Amino acid sequence: MTNLVTSVQTVASDHPDEPAVVYEDTEITYGELWAQTGQFAAALREAGAEPGDRVAVYLPNLPQFVVAFHGALRAGCVVVPMNPQYKSREISHLLSDSGAETVVALADLVPFVEEVRDDTDVETLVTVGGEADAGTPFREFLTAGDDGVAERADDDVAVQPYTSGTTGQPKGVQLTHHNLASNASQSIDIIPDGIGPGDRQLGVLPLFHIYGMTVVMNATLFGGGAYYPVPEWDAQTALSLVEDAELTLMHGVPAMYNDVINQPNAEDFDLSSLRLCGVGGSGIPVEVLRRFEELYPVKIYEGYGLTETSPITHFNSPNWGRRVGSIGKPLEGVHARVVTGDFEEVAPVAEGPVDEDAVDTDEITGELVVSGPNVMKGYSGLPEANREAFTEADGQKWFHTGDLGYHDEDGYFYVVDRKKHMINTAGYNVYPREVEELLFEHEAVADAAVVGIPDDRRGETVKAFVVPTPDADVTADEIRQYCLDSMAEYKHPREVEFVDELPRTTTGKVKKHELVEE
């Protein structure tokens, strides 16, 4: 192959008049999208950009993100997506570490770029929307030129996203054209009948994040569907858009589905046009899944992946059957194992999910490792981190996910929790997700997160942060007793704190390190 953007070129050639991006009252056809990406690529070249140069995209979900992303790829450049919620301190590391010389930023975010510009290599600044004191407006930046598509090798880096950086500085993840093209193709294949013209995808997952970028935007555009970007998550807005535009596909994180079911008018929305809902980013509580499916005539299919794997490695595809509580089976071409600290394979259970109170979880779990065409090239400029991230075994290069889980004889995998989130209390291992699942079943709990906190006697003890439902009348003692009635004594939260909301990343993951710090 040459360049993963040629997949968009193929669709634009075959279906030039079909809608590619629909935003509010604006519809961009594939023919128009391809022309605009060519203009952006030509403008980059005129500005001095060469293949391999980094182009930072500092935007929410807008049509200009789609154009800049694929236009940069057409020029042979590497896209560095940046979270639009980041401020100057946070983008400083991303710009410096990547060496980006071009930034495409929302006008409101330009001051943050200007604040760190002298400490970075940024030379070209393109602005989107509003008025900015610096830079060139997006429309003015585009040129009339279009000199084709830069050839790139499979192993050339296409996108360099950054990990969330919950410990230490965020790491630049080098994802190649082959990584991303293969995973977009896999993301199409897991959907019955794939994705094609006539499909309409809800774009609520942020495009700076690999889930929204690959599984939603790229898979939709590579399949010929229409992508509907939404700049900010709002449950009412999303539900109205699905109903009014009769969208057919939706992907989200568990927090989004939890928001939906907690809307006071949730049952008033007609989501019958949806043929599949996907969820990833973290494990969805079974109770949230159950309540959503009671409200709407569509199933949620859980998947799994990481930034380093482009992202998706496992999915509960309707093509091979869903197993609630599982992250699914590995995708075509992806290999997965559960291993001990010595990289010995852990034997599968007969069938999952298991009753974790009836088995010795430590005997059946290990770290999930994966290998496949979607696994990153490596972390940028971090040889020691790369040595820790990979293990060579049986002629394959295995990536350590850092997640603990088990698998069964039918080929389904189950993630118990993040390795770093596991709580060790008085010698017993407690997996926060198990306690969280139970909490979500309580009628007075709208949201919950469980962490380990220091304890002089036990080393660590379990603490639950609970967001109560509106008008809930419940006490911490009642929550503690509820958990104690349903699980082993050492697992129940000895401390319960009620909060108005949980700190979350823009992709919906709970910032557990912040809860621990509190």
Image (cartoon, rainbow, N blue to C red):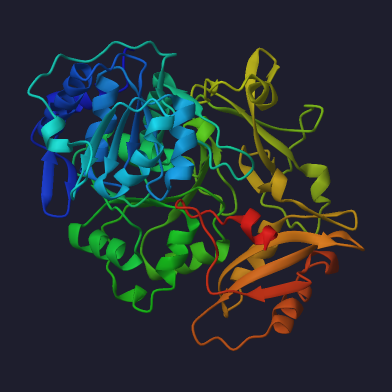
The answer to which image quadrant residue 76 occupies is top left
Task: Compare residues 342 and 314 and report the one nearer the observer.
Answer: 342
Q: Tell whether 174 sits left or right of 153.
A: right
Quick check: can you spot residue 271?
Answer: no
Q: Position of residue 381 (x, y in %)?
A: 56, 20
Q: Please give the name of the residue rendered at 31% of the width and 12% of the height, measured from the top-left corner.
A: 2
Number of numbered discs: 0
Quadrant showing the C terminus = bottom right
Q: Tell whether 178 sits left or right of 65.
A: right
The answer to which image quadrant residue 180 occupies is top left
Q: Please give the name of the residue rendered at 55% of the width and 32% of the height, measured from the top-left corner.
A: 171
Quadrant showing the N terminus = top left
Task: Compare residues 161 and 199 and report the one nearer the observer.
Answer: 161
Q: Position of residue 402 (x, y in %)?
A: 67, 38
> From the viewer's perspective, is residue 266 above or below residue 457?
below
> From the viewer's perspective, is residue 167 above or below residue 243?
above
Q: Position of residue 173 (x, y in %)?
A: 51, 28
> From the viewer's perspective, is residue 153 above or below residue 397?
above
Task: Compare residues 171 and 405 and report the one nearer the observer.
Answer: 171
Q: Please give the name of the residue rendered at 49% of the width and 27% of the height, measured from the top-left corner.
A: 97
Q: Position of residue 339 (x, y in %)?
A: 75, 32
In the displayed orientation, state which residue is furthest to the front: 118
Quick check: can you spot residue 373?
Answer: yes
Q: Tell whether 364 sits left or right of 181.
A: right
> From the viewer's perspective, is residue 15 above or below residue 449?
above
In the displayed orientation, state which residue is furthest to the right: 457
